[in-house]
C-alpha cells in the first residue's frame, strides 16, 4: 500500500473537522507503524502522539476467518488495568457498518482519547481517558466487517459481506482468538457494540450461544451483550423519531395525534396520495426547522446531552 500523497493529506486537512483530522492523521501514522507487523499478535509499547510508553498492554494482530481462511480480521486488544485474570472480556464492534475498532478505542470506551486543545493541524496528541472501560475489563476492538480499518481479504468476492456473514466471521474470530489466548477462556464474555452493531451483536451472540449448546470448542463463558444507541431495525428506528419527539415535548399532543391518525403510524414512507398525512408532516417539518436544536439525528438517535452541539 502506497503512502498518501502530500496534496491528498492537505485536502483532508482542509475539509475535515478537527476531531476527524486527528483521527485521519493518527490512523495514517498507525498504518506506517503497524505495516511491518506479522499476522501473529504483536505488543505495541508506543504510539504516535502519546508521550512515553503506554501504561497498559496493547496487542494488535490478525486472525484468519472466512470459508477458505482468506479473510484477515485485524484487532486491538487491551488488557484490563485492574485484574485481567478475572475481569470480563468484551468483544467490541463499532458500527457503520465499516467504522474501525480504533474509533471505539479513542472516541468511546478505550483508554486513549485525542487532546483537541493541543491540536494545531499537525501530529495529533493522545492523552489517557479516565473513564475507560479497560479499568475494569479487557477489550478486543475488532475491525469488522472485512474491509474495515486494517482488515482485508485476498479474494475480492469476500468484500461483499452481509450481516449474517459478518456475524459468522466474527464468531470464527472469537473462537480462534480464545484458542490463541487460553488464559481468557474462563473470563466472563460480553459482546458489545454501538450504532449499526445493534444488528450484528445479537446475531453473533446467538451464534455463540448455539455453539455452546452444541458443545463447540472452545466453550465460552458467555454472559450477555451490550448495546449503545443501537440500530435495531432500519425502518422502525427512523419511524420512531416523531413519537420520540412527542415524548420529549418537541411537538404538541395535538400535532402528534393528528400525525398518528392521518398517517396511520407511517411517518418515513407515507402514502403521498394521503393529503391529510402529507399536510401534517409538512407542519412537523416546519416545527423541526424552527426548533433551535432541531430534532434530527443528533437528538433523536444519539445522546440527548448532545442536542445543542
Image (cartoon, rainbow, N blue to C red):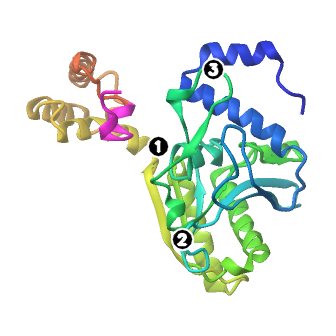
Indicate the secondary structure of the residue bearing disc 1. helix
Task: Give how far across and how far down residue 128 sits, in percent.
Answer: 54, 48
Query: Of residues 262 and 215, which is closer to you in this image?
Result: 215
Query: Of residues 55 and 201, which is closer to you in this image?
Result: 55
| Residue 231 covered by magenta stretch | no
Which residue is at 90% across, 46% downward? 36
Residue 285 against residue 33 in the figure, above or below: above
Disc 1 residue crowd, few under 14, some 14–19, many 20+, Cα 10 Å: few
Q: Is residue 246 left or right of residue 206?
A: left
**Residue hosting label 2:** 82
Which residue is at 82% across, 54% downward? 72
Spatial separation of the CA atoms under disc 3 and disc 1: 37 Å
Query: Of residues 176 and 109, which is closer to you in this image?
Result: 109
Indicate the secondary structure of the residue bearing disc 3. loop
* Quadrant assignment for the C terminus: top left
Q: Is residue 240 left or right of residue 213?
A: left
**Residue hosting label 3:** 121
Residue 116 against residue 222 in the figure, above or below: above
**Residue hosting label 1:** 234
Spatial separation of the CA atoms under disc 2 and disc 3: 35 Å
Of the two numbered discs 2 and 1 in the rendering, the one whose residue sits closer to the viewer: 2
Part of the protein shown in magenta: 297-309
Q: Mark 2 vs mark 1: which is more N-terminal? A: 2
Amino acid at each position: 500500500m502506497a503512502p498518501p500523497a502530500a496534496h491528498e493529506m492537505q485536502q483532508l486537512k482542509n475539509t475535515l473537522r478537527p476531531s476527524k483530522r486527528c483521527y485521519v492523521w493518527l490512523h495514517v501514522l498507525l498504518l506506517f507503524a503497524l505495516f511491518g507487523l506479522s499476522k501473529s499478535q504483536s505488543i505495541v509499547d508506543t504510539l504516535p502522539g502519546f508521550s512515553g510508553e503506554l501504561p497498559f498492554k496493547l496487542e494488535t494482530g490478525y486472525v484468519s476467518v472466512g470459508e477458505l481462511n482468506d479473510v484477515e480480521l485485524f484487532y486491538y486488544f487491551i488488557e484490563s488495568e485492574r485484574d485481567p485474570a478475572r475481569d470480563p472480556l468484551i468483544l467490541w464492534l463499532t458500527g457503520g457498518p465499516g467504522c474501525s475498532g480504533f474509533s471505539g478505542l479513542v472516541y468511546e470506551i478505550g483508554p486513549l482519547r485525542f487532546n483537541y486543545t493541543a491540536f494545531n493541524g499537525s501530529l495529533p496528541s493522545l492523552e489517557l481517558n479516565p473513564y475507560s472501560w479497560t479499568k475494569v475489563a479487557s477489550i478486543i476492538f475488532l475491525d469488522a466487517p472485512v474491509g474495515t480499518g486494517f482488515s482485508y481479504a485476498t479474494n475480492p468476492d469476500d468484500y461483499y459481506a452481509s450481516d449474517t456473514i459478518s456475524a459468522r466471521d466474527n464468531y470464527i474470530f472469537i473462537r480462534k482468538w480464545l484458542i490463541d489466548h487460553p488464559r481468557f477462556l474462563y473470563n466472563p464474555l460480553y459482546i458489545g457494540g454501538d450504532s449499526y452493531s445493534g444488528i450484528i451483536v445479537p446475531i453473533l451472540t446467538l451464534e455463540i450461544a448455539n455453539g455452546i449448546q452444541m458443545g463447540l470448542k472452545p466453550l465460552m463463558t458467555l454472559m450477555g451483550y451490550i448495546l449503545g444507541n443501537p440500530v435495531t431495525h432500519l425502518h422502525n428506528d427512523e419511524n420512531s423519531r416523531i413519537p420520540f419527539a412527542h415524548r420529549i415535548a418537541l411537538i404538541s399532543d395535538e400535532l402528534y395525534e393528528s400525525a398518528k391518525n392521518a398517517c396511520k403510524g407511517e411517518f418515513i414512507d407515507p402514502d403521498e396520495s394521503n393529503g391529510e398525512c402529507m399536510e401534517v408532516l409538512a407542519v412537523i417539518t416546519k416545527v423541526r426547522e424552527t426548533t433551535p436544536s432541531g430534532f434530527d439525528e443528533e437528538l433523536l438517535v444519539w445522546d440527548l446531552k448532545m442536542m445543542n452541539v
